[in-house]
Structure formats: structure tokens, C-alpha cells
Image (cartoon, rainbow, N blue to C red):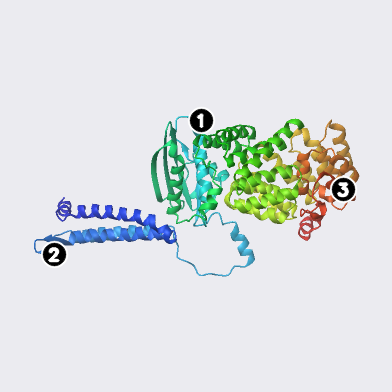
Amino acid sequence: MAFLSELRRRKVFQVAIGYLAVAWLLVQVTATILPAFDLPVWALRLVVLLFALGFPVAVLMAWALELTPEGVKLDVSTSGGKRMLAIAAVLMAIALGWFFRGHVLPKPHVAQAPAAVAASAQADRASADERSIAVLPLVNASKDPEQQFFSDGLSENLIDTLSRFDGLKVIGRMSSFQFRDDKGDSAAIGAKLGAAYLLSGSVQHAGDLVRISASLVRAADGSTLWAEHYDRPYKDLFKLQDEITNAVAGALQARLLSPEAAARQDDRPPSGNIEAYNAYLQGLTYWHNEDFRNAAEYMTRAVQLDPGYAMAWAHLSGSWSTVAAFRDTSPEVASEHMRIARLAADKALQLAPELGPANAALAYLKVYHLDHQGALAGCRRSVQLAPKDGTVLNGCGYVLFQVGKLGEAIPLRARLLSTEPLYTINYLQYARLLMAAGRLDEAEKYLRTAESLPLTNPEWQQRIVFSRMVDAMMRGDAKAAMDIAAEMPAKDRVLYTALAAQVGPDRKTADAALANALAGMANPDPYTVAQIYALRGDAAYAVEWLQRASTHDLVFLPTDPLILNLRNDPGFIAFCKKVGLPPPGEVETLSFDQIRALPANRQARK
């Protein structure tokens, strides 16, 4: 008690409180002005360290110096001096420990052999880039579950907007949203996502009020870099979004690449129509859930509310073209959906010629109509305009593969992998690209990763199984391929078994499997039958069955090593020209026989 009384007498508490108040104010000012000087992210931590080290000094000075009528005098007459020194030392140690926690001294550079470089690539996610961030889905704090789309939409807007800052790697929606309601350790989440920082929070939308709480933490140790609570009128939503984005970017010392370019890719309506934006966010939820009919319904509502909303027009086009190309509809209905999709894409480009998703929407339409040159040009332009847009990269990754441009499709898909480390279909598509390039061992690794991740779409499992079967076929393992074919859906199992049997040495077994499939199925899939005949070297029958195949299947023909076994056949070349497919000789995808003939794959079969 005597020590506490002496602290009060010497006004140590008053000095400590005053110091902390001034230090807090100066840290806020420093955090605001540091981005203007483009200083590294640790600069603010250094400023905080200096203030932290100054605190015990200030406390010691308050203890040792006494203000008297004669002026400031040194007073060490009372007991407690050693105790104060110990307290000051502990405070300094805590400050230094906080600063250096998670930081290691630089190690001397040692040149790595190529094998060592390759081995270290697998660890890239674990040692996250210092300038990387994941936006975890904001919690819907409203009592209404129907408002989930609103909190998800605001989360995605943060992802899109932050991705336009220079040097900032932002983890994509499909990966970060897997941690919805996750209460796990920040270090574990950061390691899985490959992110050094995590942004999380909650959203409550009630009537004319929006309430958002958000915090930015360092994933490695959970320390908070920035946190804020906002209460704003709903009509000021867009200003609030910008305020949060700029605050987070400021905490990370990030600078916007180009305000003009960023504004051109904004997903909000230029008119500021919040109700149209609300409809767009609802449609976006359905879009990501692959419910494109409902996505189209809400995108239609958005453009009705704001006819100048280019981003909504672009998504309306993509929704209807996807329904037309991949959903079971009559030719007449599909044609009408394609017509609406084309009108929507044209409108989006008329409103915003430099909008990445609008250019991509038109590219999708062109590839569905087998205009491969137009699709290629559209996707190149789209990726140039929106190089970090996950939807653009994913969609154009398909298109580049579909037009046979492996040299462009592979690095584009790899770029998406770096920001979507937990997106199942991305690993499958990357594996298919590698298989088409004859890189079977690499492809197998990514197929295994795809199988280990959550399969939120039942169709993904079937695609993975089919890719595993083709991988076994390319390795010449007919038994393994036929065993995998048994995992396919029952209605198609006999046909896929016949396909797998074609690579075996027993021709009688292969012939019997094909005859069994054709006799036992009333309507066998024409494209799969064409693949079987292509592997058998029977070009005439293969082309005959291709003529019965749907446009949906023909769109993917340039990606198919099995069919491309016919690439030098005159009848097949003539067929491709007739329907509008690129000349087989210009497609970069290798044929089945070419892949098996590669030295690395021949060695693997020995």
C-alpha cells in the first residue's frame, strides 16, 4: 500500500494515462499519413515499438523527478526505486517481444539447386506472402436469414476492391468462404489460405441502418492491426464500403493501382442505385451456387431498376448463356436464352467497353457458337482489363483451353490457383490442362488434391473420376481404368467401361465391351462412342458419331486428347472445318498417342 501511495503522490498514474492518450493519438495520425510515403508494412509496428519503449521511460521519470517551487529535482530518497526499475525493464521486454514475435533474423542467401526450388514451391502457402490477405465471410448479424446474401455481397466487394491495390495478393471468394463461422486458430486459417492477414467482422442491415464491425489481424499471431465499428445510413452504403477498404489498405500500406482503372471494374452501379445493387448481390449469391436461372432472374431485376448497370448486364448474359449451353432445355428455349444473353452482353459493352466481365461474357457466347477467334480475342482483352478478377480468370481459363491454347491456359489457371488455393474445380481443370500437355505425373498430383477438397457440386465427383480413368488409360493401365469406370454413374457405366477397355492388349475384350455397350444402351452418348472409335483408329465411324453429338460436347473437342487421335485424318479435318472448330493441327492439345509416346510417359509404363 505504501508503494501505491507513493505512486499517487509522485503523479505516476497521471503521467502514465496522459502518455498513453497522446501515444494513441499519434499512432492514429501516423497510420493515416504513412501510406503517402509508400513505407513497408513493418514501419507502423516500429513507431508503436518506439512509443512502447518510451512508456517505461516516462513512468521512471515521473517517479524520479519531482516538481517543486524551486524547479524539477531528482528525488531518490524513498524506497521503491528498485521495484520501479524492475517494472520498467519488464515493460521494455514485453514491447521488444511483441515487436519481434513472428519475425526472424535474415538468413544468408544460399543458392538452391533446381530440385530444391521445386520442393520449396509446395511450401509457398504455408509461408504466406507478407502482402497477402483473406477476407473471411462477414457474419450476418441480422435476425433475418434472408439477409445472408447482403453480408456475402459486401464480403465479395471487399475482395474485389482490395485486389485492385498494388502488390496486394487477395485470396478469392471460393476459398475464403469455406471458413464461414470457423472459430479456428488464425494461424491455421492463414496457413491453409496462404494469407498473412485476415479480415473478418459482422454486418447488420435493419431498415435504413447498416452496422458493420470489422477487424484486421495478423494471421501468424492473431494480433490486431486495425479494428473499427461503423453505424451508417443505408443510403451511404457505397461510401462506407470505400471507407472500410481504404482503412484496410492503409493498415497494409497498399496503394491503389489506378483509381480510374479500378472504377471501371467496380461492381456497383455508377448511378448509386442501392436497390439495383441489392438485387445484383442476390443474383450473385445464386451465381456462385451455380443456380444460373435464379441468378438471371435477379440480374434482370437489377437492370430493370437501373438500365445503366453494366456489371449486372454482364452477369445476366453469363447466366443465360450458361443455362442455354449446359442445362437441359429444348433447342428452341436454348436459342432464346442465347439471344437474350447476346443482347445483354452487347448492352454491357455499350455501357462499359472496358469492363472485364462484359468482354468475358461476349467471349463465352462466341465460344459456345464456335467462333474461336472471337472468343480468344475477347478473353485476352478481358484478362488484360481485369487481371485479378476470379470469375474472369476462371471463365477465360475454360475458353483458352476450349480454343486449344494450352500455352496461355496453363499459366492463367496457375495464376488463379495462387489466389484460390481451396477451390476444388480449379485443381481439376489444372490437372486436365496438364494431362492435355502430356504432363501426367503433375496432373495426378492435382487430381489427388481435387479429391481431397470439399465437393460442393455432385457433378465435380463424376468429372474427377473420369479424369482419373483417362489418366490410367494414358498410362496404358487398362485394368485400373476399367476399375475406375465402375465408379461412374450406373446409367453410363457400361459405356465408360468400353472406353477404358480400348487401351488394353486384348482386342477381343475391347471389341466385346464396345458391342455390349452399343447393344445394351438405347441411346448411348454419341460423343463417348466417337471417343471409342477414335482410340480404335476408326475415323469414319468416329466422325459419324461426332455428327450426332451436341454442340455442348463439340465445344470441348479441342481439349480432348482421345478425339484428337484423328487430328491427321482428312475426314475429321473436314468435319472440324464444317462445324467451325479450329483446325486440329493448330490445337496445342496433344493427342492420346502423342502423350503415350512422350519419353517420360514411356518410362513410367516400364
Q: Reading the chain from its start, which is encountered first: label 1 or label 2?
A: 2
Residue at image coords 48%, 40%: 138
Numbered badge on residue 424 = none
User: Distance of mark 2 from mark 3, alpha carbons?
Assistant: 102 Å
Quarter of image, res 308:
top right
Specify the farthest residue to the left. Answer: 69
- Label 1 packing within 10 angstroms: few (<14), some (14-19), many (20+): few
The answer, for residue 151, to whether it is visible in the render is yes
- Quarter of the image with the C terminus is bottom right
Across and down, in percent, residue 457 comes to 64, 37
Tell me how far mark 1 sits from mark 3, CA to CA.
54 Å
Kind of residue at disc 1: Glu
Residue 182 location in percent, x, y? 49, 41
Front residue of this view, candidates 240 and 493: 240
Q: Is residue 371 left or right of residue 301?
A: right
Which residue is denoted by mark 2 in the rendering? 73
* Residue bearing the label numbered 1: 146
Query: Quarter-wise, where is residue 459 in the image?
Result: top right
Residue identifier under label 3: 574
Q: Is residue 330 visible?
A: no
